Image (spheres, rainbow, N blue to C red):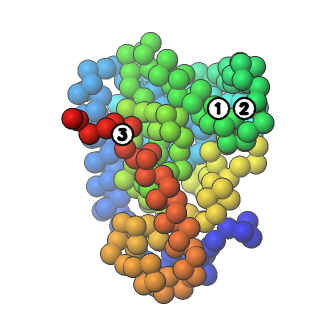
């Protein structure tokens, strides 16, 4: 990842870590949010797509704590681009939590799209988004049959930079961990007992073979979180942030670019002002 912008010491020289008391407060706050969301919707439970990554794993753990094992249902939705170990991790999470789950291979569905529009198959991003949106359709299909809502697994770092597929992995009813930065996701996961190998697993949307989040974004999550906390969410100017983190201004500008270009993803589709 030599082309990925990093912090000089691969660490985070600002404090966004949470104390044990704060972690307990977030745990209670999120589980209460999940329970109240289910009750307000008048449904029986929740469906969650399990990828084997830390975000879906943490969400599944918290949802099971909030609702109980019989009200959470997992979907493992592999395709030909997913490493076998990711899918086995996803199944391990479901089995550890003792929740029901299905494994549905999405490649036949995705291939039907490619057959219908062959030109799109060679477009890596377009094809990857088809896979993500296919999973969203299946999440809702299963949720509808179970009188359930779909729990999202997005975190704040991804939300602010648009690192999600519009009407794909953010086609959900709520995002329980949506206010946690990636480092805080890892910290809370470890705090509630998620295995270390899942906590430290390299994040990947797995839209195509060999994809990793950090390579695609061009920054590490450590750097991304630092810039988001200090500059995008925080009060510091671009140059003050660069000085504080001892990094080039270009790294700040990369995060600004991600934030600016993804603005449309954080809003409902626009319409003209009423006459």
Instruction: Examine the rendering and report whether any part of residue 195 can be seen.
Output: no
The local secondary structure at tag 2 comes to helix
Circle 3 is placed at which residue position? 270
Q: Nearer the viewer, residue 4 or 63?
A: 4
Q: CA distance from mark 2 to mark 3?
A: 26 Å
Few, some or many residues within 10 Å of mark 3 (<14, 14–19, 20+): few
Circle 2 is placed at which residue position? 120
Q: For the view shown, which residue lies furthest in the front direction?
A: 275
> Where residue 28 appears, x then y in whole percent?
29, 48
Q: Hey, which quadrant is residue 199 in on the image?
A: bottom right
Instruction: Examine the rendering and report whether any part of residue 40 can be seen.
Output: yes
- Please tell me which of labels 2 and 3 falls first in the chain: 2
What residue is rendered at 33% in x and 75% in y?
A: 235
Circle 1 is placed at which residue position? 131
Q: CA distance from mark 3 to mark 1?
A: 26 Å
Q: Nearer the viewer, residue 273 or 32?
A: 273
> Where residue 75 appears, x then y in whole percent?
56, 27
Nearer the camera: disc 3 or disc 1:
3
Nearer the camera: disc 1 or disc 2:
2
Nearer the camera: disc 2 or disc 3:
3
What residue is rendered at 61% in x and 59% in y?
A: 217
Does 44 sit above or below residue 85? above
Q: Nearer the viewer, residue 163 or 62?
A: 163
- Please tell me which of labels 1 and 2 falls first in the chain: 2
Per the rendering, the mark at residue 41 is none
Q: Does residue 263 appear to the left or right of 38 in the view shown?
A: right
What residue is rendered at 59% in x and 21% in y?
A: 102
Q: Does residue 36 appear to the left or right of 127 in the view shown?
A: left
* Circles 2 and 3: CB atoms closer than 8 Å: no
């Amino acid at each position: 990842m030599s082309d990925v912008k990093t912090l000089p010491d691969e660490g985070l020289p600002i404090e966004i870590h949470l104390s044990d008391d704060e972690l307990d407060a977030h745990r209670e706050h999120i589980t209460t949010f999940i329970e109240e969301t289910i009750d307000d919707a008048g449904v029986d439970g929740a469906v969650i797509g399990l990828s084997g990554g830390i975000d879906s794993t943490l969400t599944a753990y918290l949802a099971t704590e909030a609702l109980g094992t019989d009200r959470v249902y997992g979907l493992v939705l592999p395709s030909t681009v997913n490493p076998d170990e990711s899918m086995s991790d996803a199944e391990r999470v479901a089995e550890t939590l003792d929740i029901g789950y299905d494994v549905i291979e999405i490649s036949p569905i995705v291939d039907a799209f490619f057959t219908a529009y062959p030109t799109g198959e060679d477009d890596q991003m377009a094809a990857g988004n088809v896979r993500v949106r296919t999973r969203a359709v299946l999440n809702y299909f299963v949720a509808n049959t179970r009188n359930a809502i779909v729990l999202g697994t997005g975190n704040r770092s991804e939300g602010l930079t648009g690192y999600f597929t519009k009407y794909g992995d953010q086609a959900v009813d709520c995002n329980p961990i949506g206010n946690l930065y990636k480092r805080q996701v890892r910290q809370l996961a470890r705090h509630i007992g998620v295995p270390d190998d899942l906590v430290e697993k390299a994040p990947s949307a797995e839209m195509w073979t060999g994809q990793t989040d950090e390579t695609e974004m061009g920054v590490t999550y450590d750097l991304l979180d630092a810039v988001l906390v200090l500059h995008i969410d925080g009060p510091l100017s671009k140059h003050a942030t660069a000085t504080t983190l001892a990094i080039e201004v270009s790294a700040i500008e990369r995060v600004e670019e991600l934030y600016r270009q993804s603005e449309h993803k954080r809003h409902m589709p626009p319409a003209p002002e009423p006459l």
